[in-house]
Image: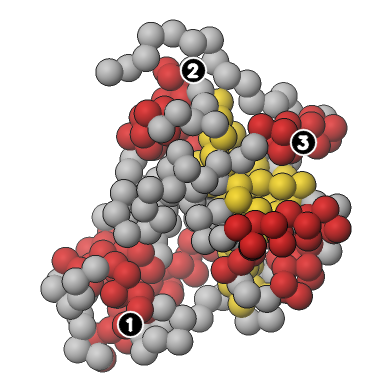
Amino acid sequence: MIDLHLHTRASDGAHEPVELVRRVWLAGIRTFSVTDHDTVAGVAAAHDAARLYGLTCIPGIEMTALEDGLDVHVLGYFIDPESTRLGAGLTAQRMDRVRRFRELAARLTDLGLPIEVETIIAGTPEGRSVGRPQVADALVRAGHVSSIRQAFDLWIGEGRPAFVPRVAPSAHDVCALIHGAGGLAAIAHPGCLRRDDVVERVALSGADALEVYHPDHDEAMTSRYRDMATRLGLLVTGGSDFHRDDGYHEGALGRVTLPQDEYDRLQARYAERGTRDCPTPEARGPKPE
């Protein structure tokens, strides 16, 4: 099985890379990509763990672009994590995440829902990202809400009282950063945008692929976006968007995957560019306990 959309604690996932890889292996997934938000801090550890399990780890990322006032997430696959240009772009993105984090916290304080924002920022290792899921966790720990979902629904989701709009580069610029790092750019979970006109605009901005298989896509959406990918000449990708075991895409790990033939097309397109060797499974040895 293949899952090209996974998150670790390097951004807003619940598990460290090594633990995530263990869960990936237990779920029967043999090719995967860690796609943390605006950081590649978890990629090296995930790759090293994948070697122990004989798995294929594709270096990846999920970056945010702004189009028509909407957050558009762009996945990057087969990237060079050491790319200087990509690194500079990610540093700028993470700095804006901290700004937004502090502004969210200030709005929550004004609403009578204070959280320990500076403690969270200080405890975030260099190169890792902060974001709204950490705000939601803090709201739960402080007893202001009963769940992460409630935090988003009542306070920090789009249109809610503490929501702070993002500042982000255009989709064209994000795709260019990913291409500059040797990767392929894919539009993430288009069904969540509910704006197919924006999806098509981003496709024309330099995207290589469209995420067709995703937990938020029902059967009709999956079919629609598969047809859109064909019409626009885009490759197809997909994955579980796994963050944690409870509440957020619960049960999607090992259930939402990418068909092998679609992955083969992605890998072939990457190989055509001749930038670096395609990742392949390491020699399979004894599996860790």
Quarter of the image for residue 108 reads bottom left
Quarter of the image for residue 188 reads bottom right
x and y, in percent, of residue 22 in the image: 36, 29
The residue that label 3 is drawn on is: 265
The residue that label 2 is drawn on is: 54
Q: Nearer the viewer, residue 173 or 70?
A: 70
Q: Nearer the viewer, residue 94 or 137?
A: 137
| Residue 148 seen by the camera | yes
**Element type where label 1 sits in the image:** helix
Q: Nearer the viewer, residue 179 or 18?
A: 18
x and y, in percent, of residue 68 in the image: 69, 81
- Which residue appears at 49% of the width and 37% of the height? 43
The residue that label 1 is drawn on is: 155
- Which residue appears at 16% of the width and 66% of the height? 141
Look at label 1 and name its amino acid.
Answer: Trp
- Which residue appears at 47% of the width and 43% of the height? 255
Check the image and report above or below for 210 versus 50: below
> Which of the two discs, 1 and 3, sits closer to the camera?
3
Check the image and report above or below for 44 versus 128: above
Q: CA distance from mark 1 to mark 3?
A: 42 Å
| Residue 267 seen by the camera | no
Answer with left or right where residue 97 lies relative to residue 234: left
Q: CA distance from mark 2 to mark 1?
A: 43 Å
Look at label 2 and name its amino acid.
Answer: Gly
Q: CA distance from mark 3 to mark 2?
A: 22 Å
Mark 3, Cα crowd under 10 Å, few <14 / some 14-19 / many 20+, is: some
x and y, in percent, of residue 241 in the image: 49, 51
Look at label 3 and name its amino acid.
Answer: Arg
Mark 1, Cα crowd under 10 Å, few <14 / some 14-19 / many 20+, is: many
Q: Nearer the viewer, residue 93 or 133?
A: 133
Q: Are marks 3 and 2 in contact (CB under 8 Å)?
A: no
